Amino acid sequence: MLNVNETTYDVPADVVDAIGKEVRLAAVQLNRYPDREFSVLREKLAEYLNRDLVSESEPATLTAENIWAANGSNEIMQHILQAFAGPGRSVLSFPPTYSMYPLYARGTYSEYIAGTRAADFTQSPADVAAQIREHRPNVVILCSPNNPTGTALSLETVEAAYAAAEESDTMVVVDEAYGEFRQSGTGSALALLPGRERLIVSRTMSKAFALAGGRLGYLAAAPEVTDAMRLVRLPYHLSAVTQATAIAALDHSATLMANVERIKDQRDRIVRTLEQMGLRPAPSDANFVFFGGLTDEKAAWQHLLEDGILVRDVGIPGHLRVTAGTEAETSDFLASLQRFITSATA
Ligand SMILES: *Cc1c(COP(=O)(O)O)cnc(C)c1O
């Protein structure tokens, strides 16, 4: 299954053990409501993000006050739109992008505005800023790296978006669900947080932490933003079991990030090999690769499926999206696609 950008490695055994121990401890107190402020988890998330910032030689400035968490970034986005969008208010994002954004808008009775991208699906600072100035939305969602195209935004683009957004009091959300997979040299919008109180960076443990089933998304922003989240969350929205699971995984982030490096290697291998096949992969900062150059993407998708490989047809003619899996999964995918290309041109 290379279609929904999960980590295809199982959770490593020592992390499974640690989660088991932490959840067992939590079980003793399950007669009580959980810590509604999830203080330990917020501290650990701040520490984790600060390490990310330090690796970019930026000052490590985040504290628990900057962090909010919820049941997946799905709920994070819902909280953001409940607080800052809603009836009579609008949300702008830039398709092709994460297909859930219009649904979050609909679910909060917000107006959804579909912005546009360049023909190669990239976004320039000037174009993003112009569209924000034109629509003056209450919330703009930037997805970096973008799903399904895989390419990250330059920090100049985020800065330009923010400067335009300030003129209309627009909240700027950067969805960095795949942030850990970015190429060295690609910056995180976390570095832009100081002094920008309308900027929100959303992250998740679903991808890099191999914890899609654990349901833990989080954001970093000004303390005033996390305070606004307290107004819209349901009481005790993060269960004690969820908190325990996430804390144990964060304590083992080094083990989990080793798999991230392996996946990045396979991602880069996919891009190189697809280029050699004469296809057109987009530059990827994610754990998946979006590629064009197919004359019949539906036939390619079907051919891969018959070889037992499920990839994503994202509805863009000539293109498919594939998740970077283990080395063996990647080899199977590349071999199957090569057979398809050979038979199609034979
Ligand atoms: C996978 C993904 C998420 C993750 O959502 P969760 O609810 O945290 O599992 C968020 N944003 C994008 C763009 C994604 O592709």
Image (cartoon, helix red, strand yellow):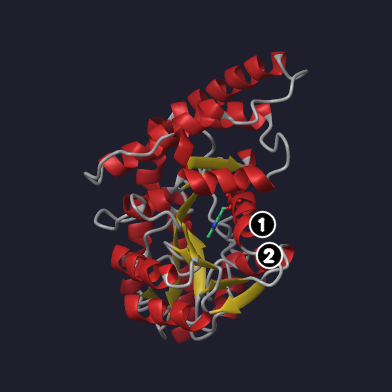
Quick one: 12 or 302, which is closer to the camera? 12
Give whichever of 196, 261 is nearer the camera.
196
Judge left or right: residue 215 versus residue 132: right
Can the viewer see residue 8? Answer: no
Name the residue beneath numbered marker 1: 82
Q: Amino acid at mark 1?
A: Gln
Query: Residue 12: x and y, percent?
Result: 49, 31
The answer to whether mark 2 and mark 1 are in CB contact below 8 A is yes
150 w.r.t. 123: above or below: above
Where residue 39 sits in the image (x, y, percent)? 54, 28
Whether residue 152 sits left or right of residue 84 in the image: it is left
The numbered dot on residue 86 is: 2
Q: Secondary structure at mark 2?
A: loop
Amino acid on which the number 2 mark rests in the picture: Gly
Query: Residue placed at 29% from the left, 67% from the top?
Result: 156
Ligand 1 resides in the quarter of the picture at bottom right
Q: Quadrant of residue 66?
A: top left
Between the residue at mark 2 and the residue at mark 1, the CA separation in whole angstroms equals 6 Å
